[in-house]
Amino acid sequence: MSLMEIVPGKTRIGWIGTGVMGKSMCGHLLRAGFSATVYNRSREKTQPLVELGAQVAASPAEVAENSDVILTIVGFPHDLREVTLGPTGTLTKASAGKILVDMTTSQPALAVEIYEAARKQGVYSVDAPVSGGDIGAREARLSIMIGGDKGVVEALAPCWNVMGKTIVYQGPAGSGQHTKMVNQVLIAAGMVGICEALLYGYKAGLDLDTVLQSVSSGAAGSWSLSNLAPRCIKGDFAPGFFVEHFIKDMGIALAEAERMQLALPGLALAKQLYVALAAQGHARSGTQALLLALACISKVEWPKRT
Amino acid sequence: MSLMEIVPGKTRIGWIGTGVMGKSMCGHLLRAGFSATVYNRSREKTQPLVELGAQVAASPAEVAENSDVILTIVGFPHDLREVTLGPTGTLTKASAGKILVDMTTSQPALAVEIYEAARKQGVYSVDAPVSGGDIGAREARLSIMIGGDKGVVEALAPCWNVMGKTIVYQGPAGSGQHTKMVNQVLIAAGMVGICEALLYGYKAGLDLDTVLQSVSSGAAGSWSLSNLAPRCIKGDFAPGFFVEHFIKDMGIALAEAERMQLALPGLALAKQLYVALAAQGHARSGTQALLLALACISKVEWPKRT
């Protein structure tokens, strides 16, 4: 099968999952001149894209029928399984030569399963999870971590370039997901450190904003420290990234690590603390709310500053 | 008691502890025009400073006799206790109005103890641990975290300014040490994350340099990731900062946290992994060697690349 050329104004995009991320990302494709057919479980969330010219389909299968490149970004691996491999999933209607691009953070093994299933009917499949959050999606500054056939990934450049800034091919199917897991392992440990450090400083009677002046720019510095620690200090636990989604990601990474016979004690601890945080009613808080779970353990009353 | 004015060419500096950090830091003071009397347990390590014009004393007490401002940077809290409160320590000879400045990473409680002991004889005391390592010391780019009486800390500005770049007053005696503990808590968790993330990526078959391209500049990014992960990938575990010193620091932080009734499960885990690393013969490796302890647990053979 030959690889199509991907060109705005000619290539028909399909988009499944128009939540906070997908809405912005598909919007960039529409504004770049691609036509799009979109699907979302809650149909009303497709409205902003309709206003940009998108058509709405009644099922993932119908999206696949009407599109050349079908992108997905949904909540959980079981959602991805349903919209791709399920009875009304994209693969029921995707014909040879079409390309599936999954941008959900999901299981590397599922990415490989979809890749194999797609290949059997001549369909290409690429896994391309992102980091950068809602702001990165809105500003088209995402980091896109991509696994699949290299030629297919390269052909998709016109799509990547309007959605992201750091676009890196990581290897065969599943490699994008594995890279995203590396990203999440780093973030998980970093958040534990930040929250424990803030609690230590608070109990020691330090002024935490002044502490950040000393520690932010040196060897202890990190993106999370600069961006999330100030929110913790202000008592702002609103979501940039939901606790429940992070628990999902850590679960995937731990399961994959176990499958590869790799023990990750730091990640396991981080996940347990996040499970406790969710149990305390914070599943829909931002990941920086981990501070509250650690405060709870030692009965620290974290001050409300706002 | 009145506070002296600190002026190069007039104020006599005393320096105790001329290891890799102290040598550079005292050298900056000498080059700025201060005179200095120095002491080190291994006398030969004072030689580079003698070449810059320093006098060598036979004991900490003799340093104190001949100096106005007496700075210390030694290995462990018990060393600091000996050179300050011991039978030939600085406080046996420090007269009213002199200033003690400890730059060792040490116990906050010991900083307070020294502060109180000094005050009884009219001596000022400041705790001022640093971060930035040997390179930061050499390039006078240290972060100096300072606790003590604010006026004394301000009077010392001519000393701080020739040794460091980020100079922040953190509060009363012990606050400098507490801030340094915050710094170490952050670094400990970060290193666990980096090493687990690299092992995950390695076992998943990813190219780790390519992975760093995806994850370094976003929400997972940190100083340690940019500076230490590449060393791990190259198999370079040479010390920037010694494992045995880091274990000391984490021990201090955990003991202080326990005293403040604060549980730090992430830091406790990190310390245990570092204890295992030291048991494996890596007490004098760099902190990034933590990767080897985690690799050992899961019998991962980390490739030698250099």
Image (spheres, coloured by chain):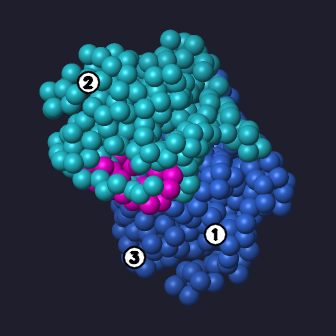
Chain colours: A cyan, B blue
Q: Residue at x 41, y 48 (%)?
A: A97
Q: Quadrant of residue A269?
A: top right
What is the distance, in whole Å, between disc 3 and disc 1 at their CAs? 39 Å
The three-letter amino acid code for the residue at tag 2 is: Val
For the question of whether residue A204 can be seen, the reply is no
Q: Residue at x 15, y 32 (%)?
A: A52
What is the distance, in whole Å, between disc 1 and disc 2 at their CAs? 51 Å
In the picture, the quarter occupied by the C terminus of chain B is bottom right
Residue placed under numbered mark 3 in the picture:
B32
Residue B123 at x, y percent in the picture: 52, 50
Label 2 chain ID: A
Disc ID at residue A56: 2
SS type, badge 3: loop
Nearest-to-viewer mark from 3 and 2 = 2
Same-chain check, marks 1 and 2: no
Residue placed under numbered mark 1 in the picture:
B234
The three-letter amino acid code for the residue at tag 1 is: Lys
Total labels: the figure holds: 3
Q: Earlier in the sequence, mark 3 or mark 1?
A: 3
The span shown in magenta is A139-162
User: Taking B265 as reference, is B224 left or right?
Assistant: left
Residue B188 at x, y percent in the picture: 62, 46
Tell whether position B160 is magenta: no
Q: Dot 3 surroundings within 10 Å: few (below 14), some, or many (20 or more)?
A: some
Q: Is residue B221 above or below residue A64?
A: below
